[in-house]
Image: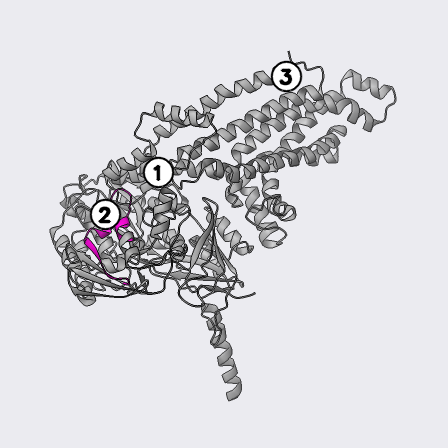
Amino acid sequence: MARFLRRRLLAVVPLVILATSMVFSLILLLPGDPAVALVGMEDASEEKLAAIRKRLGLDRPLVVQYGIWLSRVARGDFGDSLRTGQPVVEALRDRAPITLGLAVAGTALGLVVGIPLAVAAADRRGGVVDTLASGLGAFGVAVPNFLLGSMLVLILALHLRWFPATGYVSPFESPADAFRHLLLPTLTLGASAVAEVMRQLRSSLGEVLRADYVKTARAKGLAEARVVAKHALRPALIPVVTVAGLTISRLVSNTVVVESIFALPGLGRLNLESVLNRDFPMLQGAVLVTVLSVILVNVLSDILYGLIDPRIRYS
Amino acid sequence: MSQRFRTALGALLAAAVLAGTGLPAAGQAPKSGGTLRAAMRAEVSTYDPHKGASGTDHMYLYPVFDTLVRFDDKMNARPGLAESWETPDPKTLVLKLRKGVKFHDGTPFNAEAVRFNIARAQDKATSSMSSELTSIDKVEIADEHTVRLRLKAPDASLVLAFADRAGMMVSPTAAQKLGDQFGRTPVGAGEFRMVRWQPGSEARLERFADYYEPGRPYLDAIVFKIIPDADTRVSALRSGQVDFIMEVPAQDFAGLKGERNLRVNEGPTLAYWRIFMNFAKPPLEKKAVREAINLALDRPALLKAVIFGLGEIASQPFPASYWAFNPGVKPWPHDPARAKAKLAEAGLPNGFTMDMVLEPTPEHVRRAEMIQAQLGGVGIKVDLKPMDLTKGVQAFFRSKEMMAANYRWTGRPDPDQSVRGMFHSTGFYNPGGLKVPRVEELMDQARATYKVEERRRLYQQISEVVQQEAIDTPLYFAYSLEAMSTSVQGYQPNLLGKPVFRGVWLQAK
């Protein structure tokens, strides 16, 4: 296990270098450098642009800029925003928890709602619950975030006034308020997670329930609930872990729409703003956090496989 | 109907009208206290007034930085940190400064501070408005509260330029100490001081207790929230997370107008939509071609379809309520037949192809596609080039690859700032560098006189020549559209279209 972890963590280094160097080169391909973005529509002379480039170190070759950035990051210095001068670390500290929290909450919603739903559906194939769940599953996968989010705002926030329509409150400030603010974005983001977990588990559970050892368990006269919970669910959860891992990763990189609808200052918006402003230290920081969290989730789901199904060995 | 009943009804109606227009009812004194939460579309580029690059920064800056000069609703200059000014001779501008004013860090505001600020704003390497202050040769300190500006040439545009960024006074102590970090932790002499800024998300400004005007500001704090999505801004207002929103989408405006707990404001501004052109790119150097473009455009249709009529057709660089407006200059007529004739006259009977930069957001696309259709009607094929702002500015203004761009001129307090930027051969917003000598002569004359009547006449002439030479393709002035909770009182819109929250107070609901 320790060896497995060490190997996985070592693989992070080349991945980070690959991802950040790709972002670096992509910025080069964008017309209009950070200096141009900084002066905007303002009447700035070429000399002034040159002075800005020099101040920001943009006059050096790109490889050198990247090398400097990388060596600083290795020492824990992510630099400052080219636009506002805000330390990148500070922006990430403010914003990453919002996006990561949302992604985790959305996935958790998927598990909490999706698993019982799938069990009920798989237990009575073709029954009322199964039909309803299938319909819900199709809806959850098909409905786009922007539509669902806007509908939730319209009905639950503006019409019924049960929840605030926008904004973010940290759970450390006020847990109750944070819950009220984050429920609608979580529902919006989690709808597809519910659907995917449900569909995946329903089919894998269906298969397991037809397996010989389950028949044996039933033949021994075990109660159906015990058969499902003790014998069938565990092996059937393996694909769910995969889906949940993928879902978190997808949600981390997909929150930009939800952040926009609910006015949440998260990583998604930071990414977008940084691209538009050609603010590459900020963009690199945001990309780095995204990459690291995706890798972390993958490692965690690998570990979970082993815990759920001891037959999976790490060798 | 009895007399008494009629009187009562009249009073009731008057009260209703007053409530509707948002004017405080008679006898209603402003109340102190409360936090105004305002939602804006885009973040300030920096809180350093001398370095910012965006025409929409001002609304964030005005509360923090008091200006030497203020402006009224017609954009006339009014006293600010400078109590009065005079021009003993055309090349000298004397500013008498207000006494007893302090910056947020306790630094006294005096002639020395003004000298520091002007030098800072003139610094070509760092300032973004150095071009507005080129006429200032020397700043002399006459006494603690009087500065004398010695000018290289007479410059009447200076006074109103001091109502813009160039007149925003920063604390010399803080600016020297903080250097590059000043833009994150700004220190001015305005009604509010910066407490916390999370770029891209929220800024909190709190009441400056030592502000020189007793009782001001009324608000305890202003919180600016950045909400880029227009529908989300509207939702935030409707559900009460914010009290005030900027840039209401035109399609939502009518709906908000009818809502009980909300009040809206629609007002003309100096900002107008136009087609910026590079007149060095053939065939745009030909006057007949530029006339053809202007004649092919159906402005009323654009105004109606793109922003639901919430604006004013533009005939010249100034709106009707501005002091330099020329009522004699009429909007271009929509005359496709004449446009075709003009194209034939220019030797292009089959039209030509013109690329046009635009921003890839819904309203911009809607407008650009209509322009494309209208110009297409006379044989001018418009090739739309959607680009984010940085890319577009680079392509059109800097590397000058594109023929046209459909952007907005955000407006400036003084007419000189506008016409010089767009119509002078050295103007940044005239990338082709087209020179119309008559326009430049008039500009220089207008700058050299301090008499408002005289200046008005000269700018009116400039507007005439600009239309005769077809060097502007004005479309419309979009109203600035704001919506607020009925508890927000005392909001005064201005022609600049950049709200100044001075005098705003909150009424308990």
In which quarter of the view is residue A7 placed? top right
Q: Disc 1 versus disc 3: distance between alpha carbons?
A: 50 Å
Asked if the stretch drawn in magenta spans residue B125, the answer is yes
Mark 2 — residue? Answer: B293
Residue B259 is situated, as x and y percent measured from the top left of the image, at 52, 61
* Cβ–Cβ under 8 Å for marks 1 and 3: no
Of callouts 1 and 2, the N-terminal one: 2
Q: Disc 1 versus disc 2: distance between alpha carbons?
A: 23 Å
Asked if the stretch drawn in magenta spans residue B347, the answer is no
Q: Is residue B166 left or right of residue A67?
A: left
In which quarter of the view is residue B106 placed? bottom left
Mark 3 — residue? Answer: A2
Q: Which mark is residue B387?
A: 1
Identify the image quadrant of the C terminus of chain B.
bottom right
Q: How many marks?
A: 3
How many residues crowd around disc 3 within 10 Å: few (fewer than 14), some, or many (20 or more)?
few
Q: Residue at x 18, y 49 (%)?
A: B424
Chain assignment, label 2: B
* Residue type of the residue flagged with mark 1: Met
Q: Judge whether residue A17 can be spotted in this image.
A: yes
Give the extent of the magenta segment. B117-145
Q: Secondary structure at mark 2?
A: helix
Residue B5 is situated, as x and y percent measured from the top left of the image, at 53, 85
